[in-house]
Image (spheres, grey):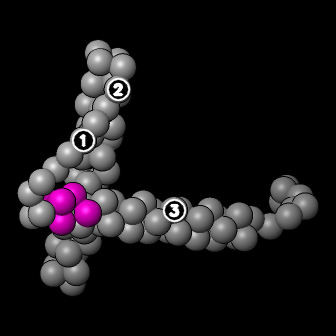
Amino acid sequence: MKRLHFLRVLFHAIGLATLTAAIIAQLLMLEAIRRHGIFIAIEPNRIVCHIELAVTILGAAYLIYLFITTIKKLRTATSNKVPNASPAY
């Protein structure tokens, strides 16, 4: 049980780190556009390109996971409510 909890925390930590990295990259890109009016990115190193691709895929997978779990929680929360129930006196 502790191992499952550790893996879940690790999964969320990596997922949140990838989303944070994506936000920071966007902010840096927008700052470059603000300063120079254009942003051109050229990365000749294949290893860096592969790492960026992996981080992007992990971030997208984590975001999809968050959406799915949130929708499931919302569905169960709304299905547990009893419609038109009058309070007991």
Residue 17: numbered disc? none
- Would you call the spot at circle 1 few (<14 residues within 10 Å), some (14-19), or many (20 or more)? few
Range covered by the magenta-colored residues: 48-53
Residue type at the position of mark 3: Phe
- The answer to whether any part of residue 14 appears in the image is no
Q: Earlier in the sequence, mark 1 or mark 3?
A: 1
Q: Secondary structure at mark 3?
A: helix
**In the picture, which quadrant includes the N terminus?**
bottom left
Mark 3 to mark 2: distance in Å? 33 Å
Image quadrant where residue 89 sits: bottom right
Residue type at the position of mark 1: Ala
The mark that comes first in sequence, 3 or 2, is: 2
In front of the other: 24 or 35: 35
In the picture provided, is 3 more to the left or to the right than 26?
A: left
Residue at 20% across, 45% down: 42
Residue 62 at what x, y percent from top left?
Answer: 37, 64
In which quadrant of the rendered view does residue 34 lie? top left
Is the Cβ of the residue at disc 1 closer than 8 Å to that at disc 2? Answer: no
Q: Which residue is mark 2?
A: 38
Question: Residue 53: x, y in percent?
Answer: 26, 63
| Residue beneath the point at 18% across and 60% down | 49
Judging by the rendered image, the residue that carries numbered circle 1 is 41
Residue displayed at 66% across by 68% down:
75
> Which kind of residue does numbered mark 2 sit on?
Ile
The residue most toward the top is: 35
Q: Is residue 73 above or below residue 16?
A: below
Q: Which mark is residue 67?
A: 3
Residue 58 lies in magenta, yes or no?
Answer: no
Question: What secondary structure is found at the residue carrying circle 2?
Answer: loop
Q: Nearer the viewer, residue 81 or 48?
A: 48
Image coords of residue 38 (percent x, y): 35, 26
